[in-house]
Amino acid sequence: MSFDRSIKIAPSILAADFANFGAECEAIEAQGADWVHVDVMDGHFVPNITFGPTTCAAIRPHIKGVMDVHLMITPVDPYIDAFAQAGADVITAHVEAGPHIHRTLQAIRGAGAKAGVALNPGTPASAVSELIDSVDLICVMTVNPGFGGQKFIDMSEKISALRRMIGDRPVHIEIDGGVDPSTAPLVAKAGADVLVAGSAVFRGGSVSDPAPYGDNIGAIRAAASGTYV
Ligand code: DX5
Ligand code: ZN
């Protein structure tokens, strides 16, 4: 996984057909997705349950590029090895998920994955100020985690503050929640480079009619790049 700050679109399979993850991953990659974002929820840290490492391992052969696993679970540490062995390239844990986020990030890197830290909307940028050298990605939640299709919460000032903290270091800023062609320019301007989008990518398409996925990905990318279509 090489580092660059170009805009990367990461469709969230939370908005895909859950009975067809393999084909959905192949379809979004064929339609221009840069990363595949995989939302793991435990019904405890967030009020919804999705799936775990077994499902991640099952979809891994259907993803050519980056598998970006977002853990909305607590505790995190007992499951890190399982997600790494499932083939996650990036494993992101929430700073709110426990008292020992630094240990969690060390364990993620120790397991051979890139380490991400996510911040809920109510958590300030300063919560990760001591972690910048311990992470490869900072995920700024622009909804309260748990569900797709929620309204975007503007976190532009937090994104800008994180961008300043990061400086020249090779750390991605990822935005998760409510990203569509109308909100993508705000977050890109503030310094984000990885844009997660669920409903705004999958709407209107299916594995048997995947062209809308490509149109949707293209519209978000164009908006983030300042060339509205
Ligand atoms: C929310 C998840 C997001 C979500 C994004 O808890 O982490 O990845 O699926 O979905 P949209 O783009 O529909 O807000
Ligand atoms: Zn997510």
Image (cartoon, rainbow, N blue to C red):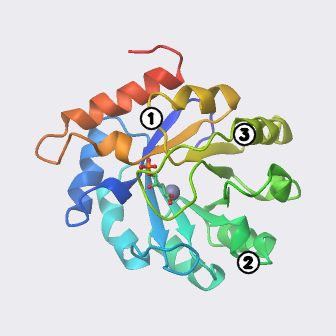
Q: Which amino acid type corresponds to the residue marked 3 in the rendered image?
A: Ile
Q: Residue furthest left?
A: 208
Separation of disc 3 and disc 1 at Cα? 17 Å
Q: Height in image: 66 above or below 179?
A: below
Q: Secondary structure at mark 1?
A: loop
Q: Secondary structure at mark 2?
A: loop
Residue 203 image-quadrant placement: top left
The residue identified by callout 1 is 180
Q: Which amino acid type corresponds to the residue marked 2 in the rendered image?
A: Gly
The residue identified by callout 2 is 98
Name the quadrant of the C terminus.
Answer: top left
Left or right of residue 76: residue 106: right
Disc on the earlier residue, 3 or 2 = 2
Residue sitting at x 64%, y 36%: 192
Residue sitting at x 39%, y 75%: 51
Q: Height in image: 202 above or below 103?
A: above
**Label 1 lies in ligand 1 vicinity (Cβ under 8 Å):** yes
Q: Secondary structure at mark 3?
A: helix
Q: Which amino acid type corresponds to the residue marked 1 in the rendered image?
A: Asp
Separation of disc 3 and disc 2 at Cα? 23 Å
Separation of disc 1 and disc 2 at Cα? 31 Å
Q: Position of residue 189 (x, y in %)?
A: 65, 25
The residue identified by callout 3 is 159
